[in-house]
């Protein structure tokens, strides 16, 4: 069977070149006679893989030297709880901006560990926009301000880093990390589950500024303590070794594409094409404020929801998979991360036009 175009929000499509490389090396990594998944994480072969992985991520994101890069487990959802436990210090309040389902989840989890001030929310608008920065209510005595740069369910994305003064800025970049250049120095902490735009599920990247390490609650287990994991190169426990390896292959692939600046131009082109097709249609609609439409996740609804089932069935037959929208928002959603080729977006647009013509 030939490869389909997988529009899943995560775990998401991977570059075909990465899968072929992993297939080629599955039984014998570079003449070692064993698979990466069989290697000791303390052995020289895997240590070399880990070192290359970290260096490539530092290079791609231009991470300054005063930041630590961690490769952990538990997903972004785990970090919802670990962030307040690690960086509150002696403070009791944190500020959060609510722009969608994942922001809401982060807020809910943080309330178990601190007082949460919701500095801004677009919930009243159905999470279709981002509140103007001037309207945010920020307590400068809080420990940090948290926001989600791209909401995968509602399709809303920040394209500018918010200025929050001297507060450490914390960002969930799970679904748009590596899709466009970022000034890492503006952040106190960035975290991202890898299963959307970086690789397979099972690894969580945390990039944390050194000055906010060492603030963890003493009750936090060592394996969840950022400072202790940083001191141990993320190996206090046995890491998800094969997933690290696959993440490393994705980073190498990204470098081969010309890096983040080059992939951003492709992402802009893909998203603009799809949104144009939706906007010019009388059958499809995207309700997100055009200033904040996500380049990574494009939700849309059909004018007649009774056609949803037929749309999805015929799309699958055309090799266009996982277009069903999240249960919260319904409708459709096309996730077009870095690894989605432009030909996949073109095929979706062609299918949508033909479906509209015949329905």
Image (tube, helix red, strand yellow):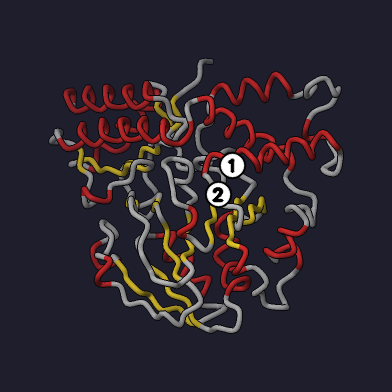
Residue appearing at x 68%, y 39% in the figure: 243
Can you see residue 112? yes
Name the foreground residue: 127 vs 134.
134
Of badges 2 and 1, nearer the viewer stands 2
Residue lying at 72% horizontally and 45% vertically, measured from the top left? 240
Q: What element carries label 1?
A: helix
Distance from Cα at disc 2 to Cα at disc 1 = 8 Å
The image position of residue 30, as x and y in percent, is 78, 22
Rendering coords of residue 85 (x, y %): 62, 73
Residue projecting furthest to the front: 65
Task: Report whether 80 appears left or right of 186.
Answer: right
Residue reaching furthest top?
Answer: 1
Q: Mark 1 points at which residue?
A: 57
Contact? badges 2 and 1 (CB < 8 Å): yes
Q: In this view, does 24 lie above or below 250?
A: above
Q: What SS does tag 2 mark?
A: loop
| Residue at image point 85% right, 40% down | 40
Question: Could you tell me residue 174's position as x and y percent?
Answer: 49, 50
* Total labels drawn: 2
Residue 263 in the image, given as x and y percentages of width and height? 42, 32
Judged left or right of residue 271, residue 237 is right
Circle on res. 63? 2
Q: Residue placed at 45% from the left, 82% from the top?
A: 141
The quarter in which the C terminus is drawn is top left
């Amino acid at each position: 069977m030939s490869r389909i175009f997988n529009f899943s929000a995560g775990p998401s499509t991977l570059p075909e070149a990465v899968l072929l490389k992993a297939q080629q090396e599955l039984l014998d990594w570079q003449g070692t006679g064993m698979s990466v998944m069989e290697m000791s994480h303390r052995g020289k072969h895997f240590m070399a893989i880990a070192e290359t992985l970290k260096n490539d991520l530092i290079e791609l994101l231009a991470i300054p030297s005063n930041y630590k890069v961690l490769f952990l487990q538990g997903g972004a959802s785990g970090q919802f709880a670990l962030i307040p436990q690690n960086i509150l210090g002696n403070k009791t309040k944190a500020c959060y901006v609510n722009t969608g389902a994942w922001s809401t989840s982060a807020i809910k989890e943080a309330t178990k560990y601190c007082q949460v001030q919701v500095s801004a929310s677009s919930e009243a608008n159905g999470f279709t926009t981002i509140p103007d920065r001037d309207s945010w209510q920020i307590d400068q005595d809080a420990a940090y301000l948290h926001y989600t740069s791209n909401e995968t369910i509602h399709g809303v994305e920040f394209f500018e880093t918010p200025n929050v003064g001297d507060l450490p800025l914390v960002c969930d970049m799970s679904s748009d990390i590596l899709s466009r250049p970022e000034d890492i120095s503006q952040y106190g902490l960035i975290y991202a589950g890898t299963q959307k735009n970086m690789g397979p599920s099972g690894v969580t990247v945390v990039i944390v500024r050194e000055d906010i390490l060492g603030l963890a609650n003493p009750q936090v287990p060592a394996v969840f303590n950022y400072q202790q994991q940083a001191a141990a190169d993320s190996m206090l426990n046995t890491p998800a070794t094969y997933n690290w390896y696959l993440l490393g292959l994705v980073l190498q692939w990204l470098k081969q594409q010309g890096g983040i600046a080059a992939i951003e131009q492709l992402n802009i082109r893909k998203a603009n094409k799809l949104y144009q097709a939706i906007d010019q249609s009388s059958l499809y609609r995207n309700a997100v404020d055009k200033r904040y439409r996500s380049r990574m996740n494009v939700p849309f609804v059909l004018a007649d929801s009774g056609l949803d089932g037929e749309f999805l069935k015929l799309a699958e037959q055309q090799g266009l998979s996982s277009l069903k929208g999240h249960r919260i928002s319904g409708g459709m959603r096309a996730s077009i991360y870095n690894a989605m080729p432009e030909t996949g977006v073109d095929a979706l647009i062609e299918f949508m036009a033909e479906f509209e013509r015949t329905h």
